[in-house]
Each structure stands twice: as C-alpha cells, then as structure tokens.
Amino acid sequence: MNEQTIYRVLGSDEWAKAVALGEYQGAPHDIADGFIHFSTGETLAATLALHYVGRDHLKLLHVPVAPIDAHIKWEPARGGTLFPHLYAKLKVADVFRVDDVNLDENGVHILPEDLR
C-alpha cells in the first residue's frame, strides 16, 4: 500500500494509559486477534460508524507508516478492503498527532477538518 499515515481510534482513558506506559498494547479485541487494528483515511469514517457508535470523547491517533512499516501487514477485511494491522505494540513516540473525536448533535463523529 502507498499510505503514509494510518489512524487508530481509541478511548481517552486508553490513550492516557498508553501515554503513562509509553506504548499502546491494543484493546482486548486487538490482543485477542494478535495485532492492533488501524484504519486508512478512506476507511476511518466507516470504522467509526461501525465500531464506535454512540461513543464520545475519543482520541484519533495519526501514525506515520515509515517507522513501523516492518510490523505492518495489509490484510483484507470488510468487503476485501485492505486494512493496516500492526503486529507489535505501538510506541507513543511513533504517534505524531492526536485529535479529539466527539459526537455532533446527531450522534455522528466529527473528524478533523483535514480528514473530512
């Protein structure tokens, strides 16, 4: 794949724990699957709509692919779309930007302007 940045959505509490530890080990479903699920810019809105319905006060991690590329596998999911899966823990130092993602008055997640 030719993506330069991939994205991870998580709860504010999960991010605070990751910052304290210096790494993000993944949510329980990531740990069970053996990898951390990420999204691309194209799949991010659908990921939020499918997996984070009604959840407010989320964090959106922007992660450059280059530093973690050796541990990324692009694997098919939803209808054959390729998704980035990280087969390692995510170091907090590898995250270059963190945005808040909240719900609008209709319960739809508001993405940062540059990802809409």
Image (cartoon, rainbow, N blue to C red):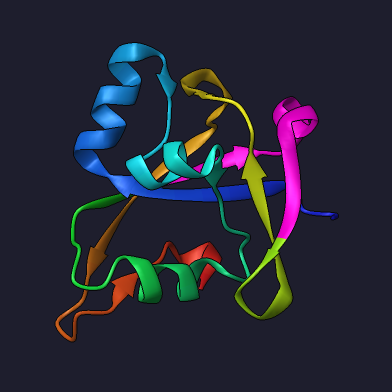
Quadrant the N terminus occupies: bottom right
**Can you give x and y, in whole percent of width and height, for residue 112 in the image?**
43, 62
Foreground residue among 43 and 50: 50
Which residue does the image show at 54% across and 50% down from the upper left? 7
Which residue does the image show at 67% across and 47% down from the upper left? 5
- The reply to whether the magenta stretch includes residue 97 is no
Residue 84, above or below 53: above
Which residue does the image show at 34% across and 47% down from the upper left? 10
Question: Within the image, what quadrant is residue 25 found in?
Answer: top left
Foreground residue among 28 and 47: 28
Residue 77, above or below 4: below
Query: In the current view of this chain or complex, which residue is farthest to the bottom?
Result: 106
- Taking the image as shown, residue 52 lies to the left or right of residue 104, namely right
Residue 89, above or below 33: above
Query: In the current view of this chain or complex, which residue is farthest to the right?
Result: 2
Residue 38, above or below 44: above
Magenta range is: 60-75
Q: Total marks drawn?
A: 0
Which residue does the image show at 30% across and 65% down from the upper left? 52
Foreground residue among 56 and 72: 72
Question: Within the image, what quadrant is residue 102 found in?
Answer: bottom left
- Taking the image as shown, residue 87 lies to the left or right of residue 57, namely right
**Can you give x and y, in whole percent of width and height, for residue 81 in the image?**
71, 72
**Can you give x and y, in whole percent of width and height, for residue 91 in the image?**
52, 20
Query: In the current view of this chain or complex, which residue is farthest to the left?
Result: 105
**Can you give x and y, in whole percent of width and height, for residue 93 in the image?**
52, 19
Query: In the current view of this chain or complex, which residue is farthest to the top?
Result: 21
